[in-house]
Image (cartoon, rainbow, N blue to C red):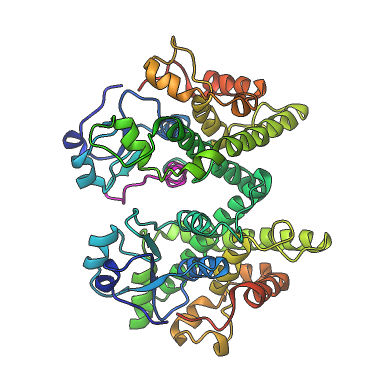
Amino acid sequence: MDYVSVEQARAMPGLRLILHGGVPAPWSEAAKSVLKVKGVEFTPVLCDALGDKAAQKAWTGHENAPVAIYEDEPPRAGWAEILMLAERLKPEPALVPGDPAARADVMGLSTLICGEQGFGWTRRLVMLRDIAAKGDAASGGEKAIFKLIDKYGYSGTESDTAAARTAAIVGHLAARLHAQKARGSDYLVGDGVTAADVYWACFVGLLDPLPEAVNPMPGLFRMFYTNTDPVIGAALDPILLAHRDMVYERHIGLPLDF
Amino acid sequence: MDYLNVAEARGRPGLKLVLTAGVPGPWGESAKAVLKAKGLDYLPVRQVLGEDNQELVEWTGHRNAPVVVHDGELPRTGWLEILMLAERLKPEHPLVPEDLAARVDMLGACHLICGERGLGWNRRLMMARDLVPSGPPSEAEPAIVRLLRSYGYTPAEGAAAAGRVAGVLGHLADRLHAQEKRGSSYFIGDDLTALDLYWACFSALLDPLPAEVNPMSDAVRNLYRPQDAVVRDAVDPILIRHRDMVYQRHIGLPLDY
């Protein structure tokens, strides 16, 4: 992906999306995929994850990624804010249904995947737990990853329950897909792609990353993204990966470009 | 309510909640209701409607309310961020169900009420449709008009807003009728959740509580009452009974802002 710097991006018009470069970070991949599925053009901007973030902070008020900045509107860093911006900029194809019941379903599931205490949140705690367990034996790379993803303060107590919470969410999503399959749909809600499908396809990379041929991520990140927890592993029903593959094939496209 | 100003609040420990003083704004009232239902004490901090609030911007990076500041953590402005902070600080008496199906159901419905392009958002667009003059902004415009302009109003969005509000109201009423049939007064299961609090607080944008328990100015009261028949007709009496029950049993009256 051809990124521009924060300094270059500030002077540009249109939609600019600050992303983690070099890794398929799930919130960044999800933001890109939402825009891609909707056909909304954007300029990718590199978040210097381990470097000086002063320029990004001065522009957006945020140090993390993704951050979407449309024209001179306030920056948007939350997954729902970015989704709603995309829906406004290009209403069709809609990733959030107009019907209130289906809309609630999509937003509820999306919160379960992307939101605080949701799948991405609890999976990150499991990753932190695994690095913390190594103590001083952790490599320099592992310590760097710990620092990178420990955004909200590592808590051993919270991490102890994180695997079970992650597994429960994974199981809930699998049960929904089975129920949908029984009524003839491949999607999480209704009969077409919604934001919930796009989010799950991007976030399941935190358990089983797409293969190297279409996802050339650094080996250290692949190791951490690949699940080794037996409780989560038992919950990772094949239907969840079949859904991921279908969403990338039909809607997002491959290879990943980060 | 005895508000601190920003200078007094900065550096104080614990939970600080920035609110628009003198107005029962639904996002602010629901943040207060969530903290009250959880039994979390907080220091109320004054934000002034429609003004620059420069000290607040310097402190939190935000001009509007509500903003929650907890010790050294990043300020939280979104309804969901504030709810999840409250759940973390006091997990007892959860307002977000543990059961995942109920959690999805509840959070999805909360998005319909509080989220972008939801009920509150579209009611605000309806107000903008009624108040914002066509043509470019002028310096002489009242603060409320300047504020409404800042919400991204376009004539097309304003025209669609009433239908969207009515759609959400119909959905919420259907849910309450279904729950009533199974013997519950609440939106989800048999107990209070955040969804009940949000609806109670956001119902003010359709039918504000009476003056004796809600001493808002006539100008704001008129603004909060929709003129559109399609919206007024969608306010099923069960929605108002639910609002009254939630205030009586859980939030308490009179309102204090």
Please state if B54 lies on the left or on the right of B96 as rendered: left
In the rendered image, residue B153 lying in the magenta stretch gets the answer no
Q: Residue A188: image x %, image y %?
A: 69, 60
- The residue nearer to you, when weighing B239 against A220, is B239
Q: Pick out the residue farthest to the front.
A: B135
The quarter holding residue B154 reads top left
In the rendered image, residue B76 lying in the magenta stretch gets the answer yes
Residue B216 is at least partly visible in this image:
no
The quarter holding residue B145 reads top left
- The residue nearer to you, when weighing A170 against A18, is A18
Q: Residue A194: image x %, image y %?
A: 63, 60
For the record, the magenta segment spans B72-88
Q: Is residue A12 above or below residue B120?
A: below
In the rendered image, the quadrant that contains the N terminus of chain A is bottom left
- Marks counted in the figure total 0
Q: Is residue B33 above or below residue B106?
A: above
What residue sits 51% from the left and 63% below the top?
A120
The quarter holding residue A213 reads bottom right
- The residue nearer to you, when weighing A157 against B65, is B65
In the rendered image, the quadrant that contains the C terminus of chain A is bottom left
Q: Pick out the residue farthest to the top.
A: B212
